[in-house]
Image: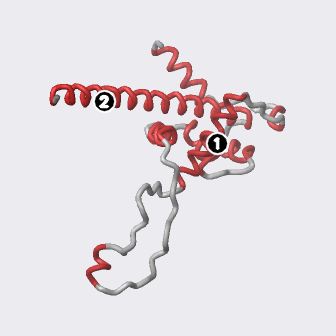
């Protein structure tokens, strides 16, 4: 893609949408957008956990263990999250996005759960329709970036497995 396309895309996303009477019309979503919405909802739940993949600690902090006294009882268990490469890649893709209108729209919609959307759009000085357009475009871009991250990691894993296999052949 050439630089002019990126400039036009940036201008399209950043432009204030004209206000019209269609603000109250329901937004129609495609199957792809519904799937992306589901992925983003799963990411929000995943992100809200502490992503503990090991057992919960049985003892307090090291400093607490040295003091010999416990100030409060430890709660057994703890929040856990599914170990998902897809959601981890989406998180990396999200954190790499610049702070722009599209990321703010995404944050308002998914992270902060602002309702009604019409008010959030008005606070950003855009229409409700433009809010959903920006949100949909950001979800697509985020998903594409996460797929690229997963593909890159899969290729690195293949190279690593190939090197491991060659090392085994040499050792035999």
On the question of residue 98 being in view, the answer is no
Q: Residue at x 83, y 34 (%)?
A: 25
* Dot 1 alpha-carbon crowd within 10 angstroms: few under 14, some 14 to 19, many 20 or more: some
Instruction: Answer left or right for 20 relative to 76.
Output: right
Q: Position of residue 37 (x, y in %)?
A: 65, 38
Which residue is located at x 15 percent, y 30 percent?
171
Quick one: label 1 or label 2, which is nearer the N terminus? Answer: 1
Measured from the top left, where is residue 20 in percent x and y? Answer: 80, 31
Kindly tell me whether residue 160 is visible in this rendering.
Answer: yes
In front: label 1 or label 2: 2
Residue 172, relative to residue 58: is it above or below? above
Quadrant of the frame with the C terminus = top left
Front one among 72 and 159: 159
Query: Residue lying farthest bottom?
Result: 69
Q: What element carries label 1?
A: loop
Q: Mark 2 points at which residue?
A: 161
Mark 2 Cα-neighbour bin, 10 Å: few <14, some 14–19, many ≥20: few
Above-or-below relation of 146 to 62 = above
Q: Residue 83 at x, y = what percent?
A: 48, 47
Return the residue at label 1: 124
């Amino acid at each position: 893609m050439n630089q002019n396309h990126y400039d036009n895309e940036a201008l399209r996303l950043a432009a204030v949408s004209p206000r019209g009477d269609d603000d109250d019309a329901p937004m129609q979503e495609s199957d792809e957008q519904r799937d992306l919405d589901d992925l983003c909802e799963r990411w929000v739940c995943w992100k809200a956990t502490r992503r503990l993949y090991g057992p919960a600690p049985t003892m307090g902090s090291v400093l607490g263990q040295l003091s010999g006294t416990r100030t409060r009882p430890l709660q057994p268990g703890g929040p856990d999250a599914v170990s998902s490469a897809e959601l981890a890649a989406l998180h990396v893709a999200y954190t790499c996005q610049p702070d722009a209108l599209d990321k703010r729209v995404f944050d308002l919609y998914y992270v902060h759960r602002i309702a009604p959307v019409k008010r959030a759009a008005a606070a950003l000085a855009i229409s409700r329709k433009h809010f959903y357009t920006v949100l949909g475009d950001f979800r697509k871009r985020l998903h594409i970036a996460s797929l690229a991250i997963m593909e890159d990691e899969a290729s690195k894993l293949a190279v690593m497995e190939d090197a491991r296999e060659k090392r085994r052949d040499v050792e035999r």
